[in-house]
Image: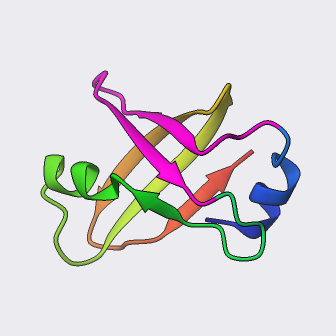
Amino acid sequence: MDRAFAIEFQNELDDHWLLADNNGNTYVVHHNMDLLNPEITYAWGNLRHFYDLKGEHRVYFRYVGDNCFHINVYMNVFYFLFLF
């Protein structure tokens, strides 16, 4: 997760996030609330299992507010990009 994003939204984000994709699938993940080393710490495996993510993939997160993110998953390159 981008550290600048975590700092900018530190007063708005809690430790549970709702992720939703274009098909209406939703996932709840947890993050550690650490501004120095922000990470998704729990339930990421559920998302990886659903999309059968093995190897490297690209996941785009767009923050829509109220601890909700819209995600797009692209196969083959794996990194996070937070848009805010």
Give the vertical position of 19 relative to 2 (above or below): above
Splitting the image into 4 quarters, where does residue 36 fall?
bottom right
Residue at 71% x, 66% y: name it.
34
Question: Which corner quadrant holds the N terminus?
Answer: bottom right
Whether residue 2 appears in magenta in the rendering, the answer is: no
Splitting the image into 4 quarters, where does residue 74 fall?
bottom left
Q: How many marks?
A: 0
Give the vertical position of 64 relative to 37 (above or below): above
In the shown orientation, is residue 23 left or right of residue 68? left
Residue at 53% x, 40% y: name it.
16
In the shown orientation, is residue 75 left or right of residue 44? left
Measured as percent of width and height from the top left, residue 23 is found at 28, 25
Residue at 35% x, 73% y: name it.
77
Q: Residue furthest top?
A: 24
Chain part drawn in magenta: 12-32
Question: Which corner quadrant holds the C terminus?
Answer: top right
Give the vertical position of 50 relative to 82 (above or below): above
Residue at 65% x, 67% y: name it.
38
In the shown orientation, is residue 17 left or right of residue 59? right
Measured as percent of width and height from the top left, residue 3 is found at 75, 68
Give the camera-side residue of 74 and 79. 79
Give the vertical position of 23 relative to 37 (above or below): above
Measured as percent of width and height from the top left, residue 50 is found at 16, 46
